Image (spheres, helix red, strand yellow):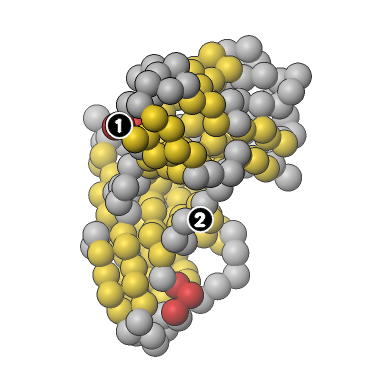
Amino acid sequence: GNSVTQMEGPVTLSEEAFLTINCTYTATGYPSLFWYVQYPGEGLQLLLKATKADDKGSNKGFEATYRKETTSFHLEKGSVQVSDSAVYFCALSDNTNAGKSTFGDGTTLTVKP
Amino acid sequence: SQTIHQWPATLVQPVGSPLSLECTVEGTSNPNLYWYRQAAGRGLQLLFYSVGIGQISSEVPQNLSASRPQDRQFILSSKKLLLSDSGFYLCAWSRVSGAADTQYFGPGTRLTVL
């Protein structure tokens, strides 16, 4: 079955530092890949996505590239802000399973001023 | 535009009491619907999903149940709550299509069972 493995947290960075959160996946077929973000006390919201190999998703300064050869979708940001503090979830979804998504366990990011 | 509502936002219930959480979606029709639970500091666990009215699939055995009485309404229930049912419950929807699609989440319900 499908699975997603994320870098364990928590991750603590200083403002303006470079961020990488690793994500690798196992899937049958050709899934779409997602990063969701969850701010404290809220539901998840889509941060970015990529639907095929070599696609790059980007939003709010965050980027992730769909790497089929390494089955990875690492999240990066060049300069984090305090407001980026949240929990980040990597996920995949394919078109063979009623639209269900498989989520990683989440990585908590804290950015200090 | 589409919106998803959940209520209540927070709930404190005694062990053995019943539960009913409601989720409604606006601005779309015939969505796929999902219930997740998020334990403290943990990832998401898919509990139920539905591809249509009256069609419910359960992902894990438990004392919870789900129903979809209307196209855009999804209800999570229990006859008798356990301490282990405490957590953050999230409802989500996605479009019914042949392609994998984004899931759109509600604001969640924080359930504490005492």
Dot label at residue B42:
2
Q: What element carries label 2?
A: loop
Q: What element carries label 1?
A: loop
Measuring 30% from the left and 79% from the top, which residue is drawn there?
A: B13
Q: Where is residue B92 in the image (x, y as percent from the top left)?
A: 40, 46
Chain bearing tag 2 is: B
Give the class, few, some or many, for how many residues have Cα within 10 Å of label 2's Cα (few <14, many ≥20). Answer: few
Q: Is residue B65 above or below residue B5?
A: below
Give the class, few, some or many, for how many residues have Cα within 10 Å of label 1's Cα (few <14, many ≥20). Answer: few
Q: Position of residue A57 (x, y in %)?
A: 49, 17
Measured Cα–Cα span from mark 1 to mark 2: 26 Å
Measuring 35% from the left and 31% from the top, which residue is drawn there?
A: A84
Q: Where is residue A4 in the image (x, y as percent from the top left)?
A: 64, 40
Label 1 belongs to which residue? A113
Looking at this view, is A60 or B99 the one in front? A60
Measuring 60% from the left and 64% from the top, which residue is drawn there?
A: B60
Is A83 on the left-hand or right-hand side of B62? left
Q: Where is residue A88 in the image (x, y as percent from the top left)?
A: 46, 38
The amino acid type found where label 1 is placed reads: Pro
> Would residue B30 be visible to someone looking at this image?
no
Q: Is residue B73 above or below residue A4?
A: below
Chain bearing tag 1 is: A
Looking at this view, is B12 or B6 the one in front? B12
In which quadrant will I find the C terminus of chain B? Answer: bottom left
1 and 2 marks in contact (CB < 8 Å): no
Measuring 39% from the left and 53% from the top, which residue is drawn there?
A: B90
The amino acid type found where label 2 is placed reads: Arg
Is A102 on the left-hand or right-hand side of B48? right
